[in-house]
Image (tube, rainbow, N blue to C red):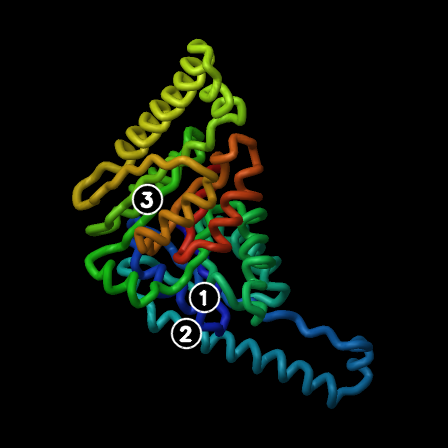
C-alpha cells in the first residue's frame, strides 16, 4: 500500500501521525511525508532580475523555507513508529490542494492522510477547501485525521473503536474489506447500516383502515429491514477474523445523522465509509453523506474509494 501523509505545522495536522501509528499497514507498504510550501507571488516580481541584491534575498528566502520544511519532515519522521513501512519525504511548492494531488499521482497513492484542520490556519477552512477537495478529486482513499480525545483514548486503550458504515453498494462493502486488510489488533468494530425513513406514502398507508393498504406498507418495512439484515451479515462476513469484536447495528433515519450519532455514542476513534452509496445516487453520496460525516464526526474519518 502506498500512503501519502500531508503535514503542515499545525497541531491538527500532527494528529495525523497519532492516527497513522494506530494502524497495522500491510507488509511492504510505503509512506511519503509531504509538506507543501505555498508559492509567494510578488507584484512586479519579474523585475527582481534587474536588482541582483533583491533577487539574491528572494532566492535565499526560498532556500531557507525549503531547508526548514526538510527539517520539519525529519522531525516528524523521528516521531513515527510504523514497523517495516518504508518512509520517504517530499517537499513541493504550490497551493496545498494542487501540491497534494500532484504528489498522489506521482506516488500512485492508495491512501492520503490529512489533518482535519490546518494548512489554511482558519478554523474549519481546511475541511472546506483542502480536505473536501481531496474527497472530491483524490484518486485514492482519504483519511481525515483528528486526535483522539482524552475520554475516547482512555476507553480505547486496548484497541481502536471503529464504526464501519455500510449499505448495499459495492463501494460500501469495500470499506469493510479495506478494514480487514489492516488487521487491527483487538479492535472493537460497530457495523452500521442505516435504513432510510419509509417513503412518504408508507406512514399514510399505515393509517388507512383498508387491510390491504396496511399490509402493503408493513410488507415494505419488513422487506427493507430484512435487506438491511443481509447487508450487515455480508459486512460481518467480510470482516471476520481473529481478535476483532463486532457489533452489528441496524438504524433508521438519515444516513449522515445516524453515522454521526452512532460515532458519538460509541466514542468511536475512526469512522470508515465508502465513497458512494448511502443515497442510492451515483456521486451524490460524496457530496452529502461523506462530506457531512467528515465535517461533523467527532473522530477521524476514512472514505474508501474503489478504483
Q: Classify 10 Å Cα crowding around label 1: few (below 14), some (14-19), many (20 and above).
A: some
Label 2 crowding class (10 Å Cα cut-off): few <14, some 14-19, many 20+?
some
Tell which circle, 3 or 2, labels the residue nearer the N-terminal end: 2
Measure the C-alpha gap from mark 1 to mark 2. 8 Å
The disc at residue 155 is: none
SS type, badge 2 = helix
Mark 3 crowdedness (10 Å alpha carbons): few <14, some 14-19, many ≥20: some
- Outermost residue toward the bottom? 53
Front disc: 3 or 2: 3
- Label drawn at residue 179: 3
Horizontal side of 53 relative to 228 (left or right) equals: right
Spot occupied by residue 289 in the image (x, y as percentages of width and height): 51, 43
Which residue, given by chain and number where applicable, does mark 2 sit on? 74
| Left-right relation of 238 to 145 | left
Q: Earlier in the sequence, mark 1 or mark 2?
A: 2
For the residue labelled by badge 1, is the local secondary structure a helix, a strand or a loop?
Answer: strand
Residue labelled with disc 1 = 89
Question: What is the C-alpha distance between the residues marked 3 and 1?
Answer: 26 Å
Residue 106 or residue 253, whichever sits in front:
253
Horizontally, residue 200 falls left or right of residue 227, namely right
Residues at marks 3 and 2 touching, judged by CB atoms closer than 8 Å: no
Residue 38: quarter of image: bottom right
Amino acid at each position: 500500500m502506498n500512503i501519502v501523509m500531508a503535514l503542515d505545522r499545525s497541531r491538527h495536522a500532527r494528529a495525523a501521525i497519532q492516527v497513522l501509528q494506530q494502524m497495522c499497514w500491510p507488509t511492504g507498504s510505503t509512506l511519503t511525508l509531504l509538506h507543501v510550501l505555498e508559492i509567494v507571488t510578488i507584484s512586479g516580481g519579474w523585475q527582481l532580475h534587474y536588482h541582483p541584491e533583491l533577487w539574491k534575498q528572494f532566492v535565499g528566502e526560498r532556500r531557507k523555507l525549503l531547508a526548514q520544511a526538510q527539517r520539519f519532515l525529519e522531525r516528524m519522521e523521528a516521531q513515527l513508529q510504523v514497523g517495516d513501512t518504508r518512509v520517504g519525504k517530499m517537499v513541493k511548492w504550490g497551493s496545498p490542494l494542487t501540491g497534494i494531488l500532484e504528489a498522489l499521482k506521482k506516488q500512485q497513492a492508495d491512501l492520503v492522510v490529512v489533518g482535519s484542520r490546518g494548512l489554511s490556519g482558519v478554523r474549519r477552512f481546511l475541511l472546506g477547501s483542502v480536505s473536501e477537495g481531496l474527497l472530491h478529486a483524490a484518486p485514492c482513499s482519504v483519511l481525515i485525521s483528528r486526535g483522539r480525545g482524552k475520554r475516547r483514548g482512555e476507553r480505547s486503550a486496548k484497541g481502536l473503536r471503529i464504526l464501519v458504515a455500510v449499505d448495499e453498494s459495492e463501494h460500501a462493502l469495500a470499506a469493510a474489506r479495506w478494514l480487514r486488510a489492516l488487521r487491527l489488533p483487538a479492535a472493537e468494530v460497530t457495523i452500521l447500516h442505516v435504513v432510510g425513513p419509509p417513503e412518504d406514502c408508507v406512514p399514510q398507508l399505515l393509517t388507512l383502515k383498508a387491510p390491504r393498504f396496511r399490509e402493503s406498507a408493513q410488507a415494505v418495512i419488513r422487506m427493507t429491514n430484512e435487506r438491511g439484515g443481509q447487508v450487515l451479515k455480508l459486512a460481518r462476513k467480510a470482516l471476520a477474523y481473529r481478535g476483532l469484536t463486532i457489533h452489528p447495528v441496524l438504524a433508521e433515519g438519515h444516513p449522515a445523522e445516524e453515522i454521526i450519532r452512532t460515532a458519538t455514542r460509541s466514542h468511536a476513534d475512526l469512522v470508515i465509509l465508502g465513497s458512494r452509496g448511502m443515497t442510492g445516487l451515483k456521486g451524490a453520496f460524496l457530496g452529502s453523506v461523506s462530506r457531512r460525516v467528515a465535517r461533523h464526526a467527532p473522530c477521524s474519518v476514512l472514505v474508501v474509494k474503489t478504483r
